[in-house]
Image: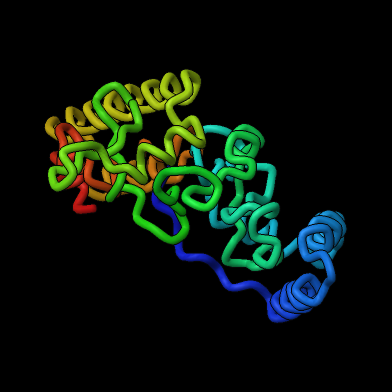
Amino acid sequence: MRRLPARAELPPATCKKLEKESKAIADAENPKDEAERRYGNARKAKWFKPVVDSLGAMSGVGQRCMLCSGSEASQVEHFRPKAIFPLEVMKWENFLWACSICNMNKGGRFPPETEPGERIINPLEEDVWSFFFIDEFGNLTARWRPDLNDVDPRAAKTIEILTLDRDALQETRQNRLDDLKARVQDSLELSRHGNLKQADLRSRYDEWRTQPFQPDVASYFLDGPGRLESPFAEFCAKAKC
């Protein structure tokens, strides 16, 4: 997960179509079946394209999954699952852009409605770095809650349901962190010798922030709490970013 921009506004015509579809589902004798049918048709319809395009744009360069940040997203994920919340199936506020692995892992799981546990985290509505941190080895980890004398339960449940600690993700986070640290340290060394100016450092900062490879690492260490750690703190001070 990573910090994401605020949810974009859809074209008025798309909003009206979603509202019309939502009303038809609510008025149906069997809303669950109607929601499944209408959503299936919508995904193949031209009018639904602005939904997909907007989600992709919010995901940033490379359209990385909003949930794991590791894989390219390709599926509209319903934060509140279709099977449990049929009336939310056509709500713009319920859509995320996800990879097939995260979408499959989450499925119809949505505690506490579907199982014991805390509500999972929505990266388009919440600051994920209030719940997680990335450690020195690139592991996405739930923050410790002194008031509970335990890790944050929402973060822990989110990691469990989406398997955000799967080996492939942890390895690529570690690789991105190692690469980013090396680039930052090299830039600082060049700056000390007068070979890079403040504008050059800022240009590199902007470039690293938009690279698609594990953007959660850049989000945490360049824009999040990790920017206070070495060597990122020194770099950000010099780059005035």
For residue 14, side relative to residue 209 (left or right): right
The answer to whether residue 8 of the structure is visible from this angle is: yes
For residue 81, side relative to residue 115 (left or right): right
The answer to whether residue 84 is above or below residue 47 is above
Image-quadrant location for residue 22: bottom right
Residue at x 36%, y 37% (from the top left corner): 156
- x and y percentages locating residue 219 in the rendered image: 35, 44
Image-quadrant location for residue 100: top right
Quarter of the N terminus within the rendering: top left
Front one among 173 and 180? 173
Residue at x 78%, y 61% (from the top left corner): 35
Front one among 135 and 143? 143
- x and y percentages locating residue 123 in the rendered image: 45, 52
For residue 7, side relative to residue 154 (left or right): right
Front one among 75 and 24? 24
Q: How is the image coloured?
A: rainbow
For residue 60, side relative to residue 235 (left or right): right
- x and y percentages locating residue 93 in the rendered image: 57, 66
The answer to whether residue 61 of the structure is visible from this angle is: no
Front one among 238 and 55? 55
Residue at x 15%, y 39% (from the top left corner): 149
How many labels were placed on the picture? 0
Residue at x 25%, y 39% (from the top left corner): 143
- x and y percentages locating residue 220 in the rendered image: 31, 42
The answer to whether residue 125 is above or below residue 218 is below
